Image (cartoon, rainbow, N blue to C red):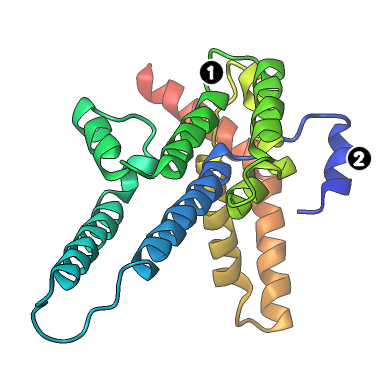
Amino acid sequence: MDPEPIAAVFGAVPHQVCTFHVLREVVNALLSAVAQERKRLAAGAPKLPRGRPGSKAARRAAGRKKRIEQKVGDLFAHRSVFVQRRLSPSERATLQRITRGLPQLRRLRALMEEVYRLFDRRCRTATALAKLADLRRRLRRFGWLGAVLKKLLSPGLEKALVFLDERLLGATSNAVERGNRRDRKMQKTVYRVRTQRAIEGRLGLDLQRERQGDGRANTTRTLHKARAA
């Protein structure tokens, strides 16, 4: 929706962005960074000739290739530990095991934990924005985090922190979005394949129902009172 009419009607009201979508983009970017690291590891595996390794160097290369393949497989099988909000002790042990010798992946997990801390409801928006500014300042040094940095530098992340100052405001607007989808589906069902005359008739019927809505509500209340008497 165009923000100009909203600003004209509601004035200088802070624009809250659904945190679910912002976190989803950061999670996807971080998983992409993990996938790039898997590809880098796989590309560094030694190329072996066909057949069993005969020499000592060939056996050493075969062992190294097997360890790299195991590491790549573990990073894929347990990729969720990089983006989960909370980790159990066993999951933290798994994270330490699969990132041994890969400090850049441990920094990714630390980054994800800091992002989740931004949305802690015990914080205020000003505190979260200060944390975000400090996080952005520190992350600019890591150029290899291009996709993740792009999401963290997006202004939408700041708008997703508005709810922290409002105790009654939800962090997500999924329920509202579901209602909007239902309304759009109903509109498509009503207006998709109709003649102009049918559409005009339907609009007239809807307007008439809205005009008679208060009367119907009063009638319903009167009937309920009469039935309860």
Can residue 16 be spotted in the picture? no
Residue 222 located left or right of residue 149: left
Q: Which residue in the structure is indicated by mark 1?
A: 121
Q: Is residue 163 above or below residue 66?
A: above
Residue visible at 40% across and 65% down in the picture: 39
**Pointer 2: residues within 10 angstroms few (<14), some, or many (20+)?**
few
Residue 93 located left or right of residue 193: left
Q: Is residue 168 above or below residue 157?
A: above
| Coordinates of residue 115 in the picture (x, y in percent) | 54, 32
| Quadrant of the image containing the N terminus | bottom right
| Quadrant of the image containing the C terminus | top left
| Coordinates of residue 18 in the picture (x, y in percent) | 59, 40
Q: Is residue 182 above or below residue 101?
A: below
Specify the quadrant of the image occupied by residue 95. top left
| Coordinates of residue 179 in the picture (x, y in percent) | 53, 48
Can residue 198 be spotted in the picture? yes
> Which amino acid type is shown beneath numbered disc 2?
Ala
